[in-house]
Amino acid sequence: MSSVAPAAVFFAVAGLVPLLVRDAFLLDGLVLILIWGASAAAWNVAGGYAGQVSLGHSAFFGLGAYAAALLGTRWGLSPWLGLVVGALVATTVGLVIGYLSNRLRGPYFVLATIAFSQVLLIVGSRWRGFTAGSEGIPVPFRPGFWTLGIADKRVWVWIVLALAVIVYLVELYLERSRHGYQLAAVREDEDAALSLGVPARELKVAAIAVSAALTAVCGALWAQYVGFVDPFYVFSIDLSVRFALAAIIGGLGTALGPFLGALLVTTLETYLRAQFGGIGAGLVGIYLIIYGVILILVVRFVPQGLTGWLAARVARRAPTGAG
Amino acid sequence: MAASLLSVVGVTKRFGGVVANRDVSFDVLAGELLGLIGPNGAGKSTLFEIITGFYAPDAGEVRLDGVRLTGLSPDRVSRLGVGRTFQKLRPFAGLTVTENVMVGALQKSHDVRRARQEALEILARVGLEEKANAYARTLSTGQRKRLELARALATRPRLLLLDEVTGGVDQRSIPGLVNLVRDLHRGGLTLIVIEHNMRVITAMCGRILALHLGEVIAEGPPSVVTRDPRLIEAYLGQVYV
């Protein structure tokens, strides 16, 4: 069980930055760190805590993004409503994927999740009459909080910070509650958990459904923030890998880990794009190589992720400090 | 006379052409300690899997206090009061010893703090209190056996199935484990124990059920069963007599 103090500091700093910083570039970076952090934390609910590793979570992100964008553009409804609809649709889809998790294990489940996101990519990019197909949907800017037409990036920081804290609290619940311990048992050894009366199948399905709903909420807010939904991005494997990677780098199955992972990955990506953006097309994908290298290094040298590494360092220093 | 707690009636289980259990029937009385013996491949562990809901029998049924267990999922069987350990030990390696036992305690107790307290009490009972904060993966085989026992006990079972209590355990640890099982039995718990160590099983059990090639070939008190010619031929050998 981890302490909440580092997370409290992390979120407090994120909440105070807009009061001290006016730079739009930095604030934009912070919004993205919090959205990717919340998405990775939502992924962590299924992939980390329940041990159901998915590489198709972009399906849920995309459903949220499309729900909010379509409800606004087609029917003029509030994206907040779209966010709720997206979460409900994603929950339903999550229940189906969760059911699959009881039929398919390990790599077969991973492949099924990838396939699912790719099916949605095809639907999103081909169903021109409804989704505008591969052209994507521009989200109209309608000023106001109810329409999420907010130009001030500081407000965006606080909105996505609220989402990040909610997802963090869900993770915290999974670390400290009865269901959390039971889910950890399912992750460690499903048959042994069953023998102790843990309703393993139901818990896995529930975890995947909650993870899906939270990911969809992230997608809905992201779409409103960025102002454009492109099926080839929101349903991409790249995006699914981004969620998983941030969680793994930060610390699988730890509450703050995905946020630290997102902080590192997003900062690095922004830096690399700024550094190599103008050189030419040959370096466009360099951040993917960097991702790969970081993943290999983390798995090799800090398998517990950044959170585990930091905790170990603090623990090593503690006796000296006390003495 | 005590009432029957578990009834196994005509259970048959096939894996392709192999018959793991053939028309196995027996009762376990409340408060009894039944020993299950037989050579490797006799169908002992398969029988445990069937009783606990991990395998569905091809024929026959299992009842606990009149309630049909056959067809129920393993978690429901556990919640009805059947605890078990596994032949191949399955600790939650990434959790601490206390957390392992808490998962069992949380079946009946919905309060995490109370479950932790219960887990610590049970760990003291099985002699693992010093390892409470250690990760389960760091335990020795004997300690893991105790941990699995503690974890199953934490579910407060009415019937406990122990698969090879002393298997793979060093000689020095055996008396402690045997005493532990005896204490549980004296406390009123009903147990079925699979065990290869005949000295252990004859010392612990009031009644023995012997399986060979999936069938019950002998049943009764240890003094009688160990003289059964079929069992001697199939399992014990003349040396034992």
Image (spheres, rainbow, N blue to C red):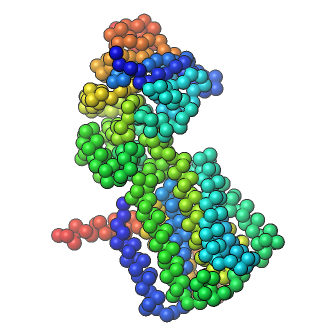
| B171 lies above or below A16 | above
Residue at image location 24% in from the left, 42% down from the top: B124
Q: Quadrant of the C terminus of chain A?
A: bottom left
Q: Nearer the viewer, residue B39 or B59?
A: B59
The residue at the far left in this view is A323
| Picture quarter with the N terminus of chain A | bottom left
Is residue A68 depicted above or below B77 in this figure? below
Q: Position of residue A36 (x, y in %)?
A: 54, 73
Q: Is residue A299 visible?
A: no
Q: Image quarter for residue B193?
A: top left
In the figure, is residue B75 to the left or right of B13?
A: left
Residue sitting at 48 percent across and 35 percent down?
B77
Up/down of A63 relative to A207, above or below: below
Whole-percent x, y for residue B171 in the image:
28, 29
Residue A160, x across and y down, in percent: 52, 78
Above or below, B220 relative to B92: above
User: Residue B211 vs residue B125: left or right?
Assistant: right
Residue B130 in view here = yes
> Which image quarter: residue A276?
bottom right
Q: Quadrant of residue A285?
A: bottom right
Q: Residue furthest right?
A: A129
Q: Nearer the viewer, residue B16 or A168?
A: A168
Count of number-bearing discs: 0
Q: Residue at x 38, y 31 (%)?
A: B158
For the point 54% across and 88% down, the residue is A153
Foreground residue, B158 or A189? B158
**Residue A244 placement (x, y as % from top left):** 55, 64
